[in-house]
Image (spheres, rainbow, N blue to C red):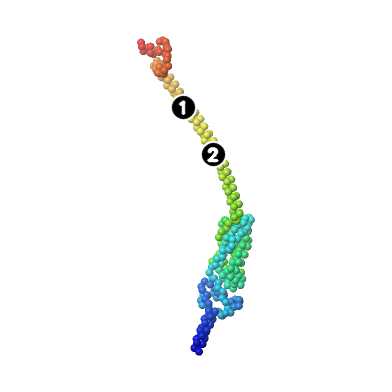
């Protein structure tokens, strides 16, 4: 009898434990909860703490209250100038309407699937109206703001908010050209740089020739001026020498003749030449006089 009573108590305890486990649940500060009954939404719980639900017939779904980030698959769009661009971007959002979120997308995976379909359309719509160069200029902020607004308008249907005031955001992590375009652009840029280098070399050679020509011309002018000045100075020197000789000759003709003869003796007799002269030669007249 006692054994039966003990078994009954244990069974009741187990039943109460199972009942409590099925009826009680905890909502943390970082999440909201949605109570479902036979798949239908009953109520939303947005306050943390220990909560109660009907056991076995009600279920609970939990949703993050924090900011969530979804890195979209790489998107390829055509800019307004028909240049293709590969875009890597992310969406940061917050679940603000649990009922709408659960009804329209169900889970985070369902939301990501929907965003993966609408974001390429939004990107193509906005970027398709501007040339590729605009994405690399200061107008990029304006373009991203337009993408943000269009994404926010679509996000409301999913029960999420991507407004910056709520911490949401849409940002392009990286924007590149497709590999084949990048190679083509690289080859074109290389060709342009080669052409520029060739042009610079040609201009440099032309300038160098001009510098050399001016240097040669300046050299010729300097040499001509130097020769002219030298001739002028030489002429002035010869003139001054002639004048000096003339003045000296006028002052003492006999001494001047004697001096000139001595110079001639020095030049003539100091060499290895042999002279055969008459004793009465005028060249030796001063020596003849000195012997007397």
Distance from Cα at disc 1 to Cα at disc 2: 37 Å
Q: Secondary structure at mark 1?
A: helix
Q: Which residue is mark 2?
A: 208
- Crowd band around label 2 with a 10 angstrom C-alpha radius: few (<14), some (14–19), many (20+): few
Q: Position of residue 44 (x, y in %)?
A: 56, 75
Q: Position of residue 290 (x, y in %)?
A: 36, 13
Q: Secondary structure at mark 2?
A: helix
Q: Is residue 18 visible?
A: yes
Question: Quadrant of the rendered structure where residue 237 is?
Answer: top left
Q: Residue at x 48, y 26 (%)?
A: 231
Question: Quadrant of the rendered structure where residue 107 is?
Answer: bottom right
Nearest the viewer among 156 and 193 is 193
**Badge nearest the viewer, 1 or 2:** 2
Q: Position of residue 183 (x, y in %)?
A: 59, 52
Q: Which mark is residue 244?
A: none
Q: Which residue is mark 1?
A: 233
Nearest the viewer among 241 and 106 is 106
Q: Quadrant of the C terminus?
A: top left
Q: Along the polypeptide, which appears first: circle 1 or circle 2?
A: 2
- Viewed as shown, does residue 188 lie left or right of 287? right
Q: Position of residue 16 (x, y in %)?
A: 52, 82
């Amino acid at each position: 009898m006692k054994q039966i009573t003990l078994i009954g108590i244990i069974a009741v305890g187990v039943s109460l434990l199972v009942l409590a486990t099925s009826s009680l649940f905890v909502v943390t500060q970082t999440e909201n909860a949605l109570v479902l009954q036979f798949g239908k939404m009953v109520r939303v719980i947005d306050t943390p703490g220990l909560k109660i639900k009907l056991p076995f017939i009600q279920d609970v779904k939990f949703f993050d209250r924090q900011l969530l980030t979804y890195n979209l698959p790489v998107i390829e769009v055509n800019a307004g100038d028909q240049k293709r661009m590969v875009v890597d971007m992310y969406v940061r959002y917050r679940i603000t309407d649990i009922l709408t979120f659960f009804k329209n997308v169900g889970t985070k995976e369902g939301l990501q699937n929907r965003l993966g379909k609408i974001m390429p359309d939004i990107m193509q719509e906005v970027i398709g109206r501007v040339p590729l160069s605009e994405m690399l200029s200061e107008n990029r902020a304006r373009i991203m703001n337009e993408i943000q607004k269009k994404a926010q308008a679509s996000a409301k249907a999913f029960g999420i908010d991507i407004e910056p005031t709520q911490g949401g955001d849409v940002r392009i992590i990286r924007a590149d050209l497709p590999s084949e375009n990048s190679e083509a652009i690289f080859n074109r840029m290389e060709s342009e740089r080669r052409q520029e280098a060739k042009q610079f070399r040609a201009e440099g050679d032309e300038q160098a020739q001009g510098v050399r020509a001016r240097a040669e011309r300046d050299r010729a002018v300097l040499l001509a001026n130097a020769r002219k000045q030298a001739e002028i100075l030489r002429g002035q020197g010869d003139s001054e020498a002639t004048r000096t000789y003339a003045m000296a000759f006028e002052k003492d003709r006999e001494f001047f003749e004697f001096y000139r003869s001595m110079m001639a003796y020095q030049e003539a007799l100091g060499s290895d030449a042999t002279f055969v002269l008459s004793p009465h030669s005028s060249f030796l007249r001063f020596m003849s006089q000195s012997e007397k």
